[in-house]
Amino acid sequence: MNVVTPKKEEISPFLQLLLLLAYAIIGGIVFSILSVAVIFLIHGMAIIKDFALITSGDPKYTDALKILQIGTSIGMFILPPIALALTNGIKTSVFYGFRKPSILLLLLVSAIMIVSMPLMEWTAIWNQKMSFPPSLKWIEDWMKESEEAAMKMTIQLLTVRNNWDFVVNLVMIAVIPAIGEELMFRGGVQRSINNMFGNHHAAIWISAIIFSTIHMQFYGFVPRMLLGAGFGYLYYYSGSIWYAMLAHFLNNAYAVCVSLYLQKNNIPLNKADEPLGFPWYGYLISAIITIALFKFFKDTAQRERKLG
């Protein structure tokens, strides 16, 4: 006798979002405490008494900043979506669609990330020209201060003293965010919003806006939002989160590799964000080819899904 196992019903999408937020807060607090405990074991009571030493830029405490960054990332982004899947009583691999990736689609994702670089540069240049009227100058000043603080911390994290630092940076900045942020924002937030409203475009763009906002880097908001939307469409078209993770990894790994190149050639890290300076038609060609590749990815992914 054949027994058909009924598909397990999920809890409501709205409750899933609330649980995801609660798990992220709890995970962030718990893993921050664990990270501080590890930092204490390495550096002793001095750094606990003056916690500002971690972000002071002193190379002596860079490892402490990296421990805190890795710990909070795991607690806030990787574990909450896993906990959400378990709460629903569904395997994480099934809940988020860890379907076996296709070589062709992986190559297409890599091509998309390469050819979209000029387009992303153009949006970054446009975003950095953002200004506010005099009545809102206080907001602009706050945003610039936040941007400078974020840049200072990023430079400290990207500083490489040896090959081991490069490996740690690659894991911390490329691997962990690619896994955690895609599980959280595409697998968790986007999936829940899509189930709530039944509109995948709204789900993708709302998730992308939240994804960009949470980074608190306003002069890079637009390109990061577009990246988030791109990751979202890769996930939606394919039904597999692997492709979004690969795209995210390639984007972040490129930044880590560029920072290594700059340091090897004694170029200041704050030069990393300077545009390469493509001609106007370079940006246009990049946009056209990127859109065409996304269309090819969509058609190929949907055809593969129909074939099972």
Image (cartoon, rainbow, N blue to C red):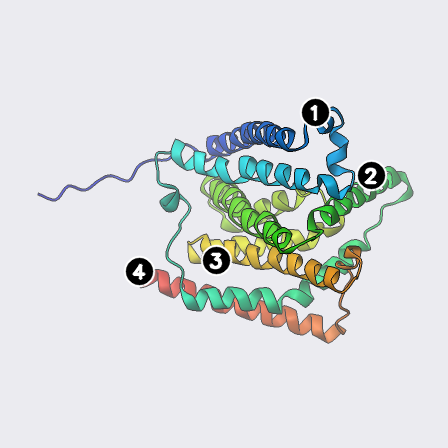
Q: CA distance from mark 4 to mark 1?
A: 58 Å
Against 14, is 308 above or below? below
Residue 167 in view of the camera: yes
Look at the numbered discs 1 and 2 and tell me whether their residues touch, using CB distance below 8 Å: no
Q: Which mark is residue 308?
A: 4
C-alpha separation, residue under disc 4 versus residue under disc 2 = 51 Å
Sequence-wise, the earlier of marks 1 and 3 is 1
The percent coordinates of residue 281 (x first, y second) are 72, 75
Q: Position of residue 7 (x, y in %)?
A: 28, 40
Q: Residues within 10 Å of mark 4 (few under 14, many from 20)?
A: few
Label 3 neighbour load within 10 Å: few <14, some 14-19, many 20+? many
Position of the N terminus by quadrant: top left
Could you tell me how far apart the alpha carbons at marks 3 and 2 are, in whole angstroms?
A: 36 Å
Which type of secondary structure does the marked residue at label 1 adopt?
helix
- The structure residue drawn at horizontal position 75% and vertical position 44%, both measured from the top left corner, is 59
Camera-near label (1 vs 2) is 1
Instruction: Give yes or no for contact between labels 4 and 2 (Cβ–Cβ under 8 Å).
Output: no
Q: Are marks 3 and 4 in contact (CB under 8 Å)?
A: no
Q: Is residue 207 left or right of residue 279?
A: left
**Rendered residue at 57%/29% (across/down):** 34
**Side of 206 relative to 296 (left or right):** right
Amino acid, disc 1: Met
Q: Secondary structure at mark 2?
A: helix
**On the image, numbered disc 1 is attached to which residue?**
45
Residue that badge 2 annotates: 142
Q: Residue at 73%, 58% (x, y): give it.
A: 124
Q: Earlier in the sequence, mark 1 or mark 2?
A: 1
Q: Is residue 129 above or below residue 37?
A: below
| Quadrant placement of the C terminus | bottom left
Q: Which residue is mark 3?
A: 243
The answer to which of marks 3 and 4 sits earlier in the sequence is 3
Neighbour class for label 1 at 10 Å: few (<14), some, many (≥20)? few
